[in-house]
Image: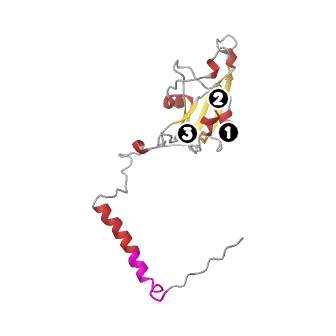
Amino acid sequence: MAIIVQRPKLKWWEQLYIPALFIGMRVTLGHLVSILSRKTKVTMQYPEEKWDEHLPEHYRGAPALVTDEHDRERCVACQLCEFICPPRAITIKPEEIPGDDKWAKVEKRPRTFDIDMIRCIYCGLCEEVCPEQAIFLRKDYAITGTSRAEMVHDKEKLYQIGGVRVGLVNKWNELK
Ligand code: SF4
Ligand code: SF4
């Protein structure tokens, strides 16, 4: 249902708009005084100053791959993260684990695993969907590069950034 908003009836002195100008200037001068007296700080001298200490605990930054405490890769190349990723930032090429390998039952591992950080929107869906807790969003927000190619993080770089995570990994469970 449409709602009709009535125009307010302005008094003659309000129609001059000059009082409103002075009210606005009073607010602006108030901010100026508090900045000059260092009560308010509005500028961060980036990159010398960073947000790192002020980020909330569960801040979602750039995604990265993690290994377990025995330096084994957690990812089983199930490609769920690639499928769920809204901007299609993830590209995985899986490969088969050889039959004579101790962990042949795991079946697959990623031969290549790329995340295009230009496309990534830090949504966290890849982390949520991963059954092996292999991909996590870190607090990094300043991902830079001098070319598009540099902004595509390959598997090696993703593990380098991600580091180690201790905890349940389904694929190393011999009973499964
Ligand atoms: S955080 Fe979101 S956009 Fe970035 S790789 Fe994961 S699913 Fe894709
Ligand atoms: S990171 Fe997780 S969801 Fe993505 S392919 Fe590897 S195991 Fe599957």
Task: Check disc 3 and give the amino acid type.
Answer: Ala
Which comes sooner in the sequence, label 2 or label 1? 1
Which comes sooner in the sequence, label 3 or label 1? 1
Q: Position of residue 6 (x, y in %)?
A: 61, 80
72 vs 53, nearest the viewer: 53
- Of tags 2 and 1, the one toward the viewer is 2
Q: Residue at point 69% right, 16% down?
A: 105
* Residue that label 3 marks: 149
- Of tags 3 and 1, the one toward the viewer is 1
Q: How many badges with numbers are in the image?
A: 3
* Residue that label 1 marks: 84
Task: Find out whether the residues at labels 3 and 2 contact each other: C-beta distance under 8 Å.
Answer: no
Count residues near mark 2 (Cα–Cα under 10 Å), then give few for <14, some for 14-19, many for 20+: some
Quadrant for ligand 1 reads top right
Query: For residue 138: magenta?
Result: no
**C-alpha gap between disc 3 and disc 2:** 29 Å
Magenta-drawn segment: 11-23
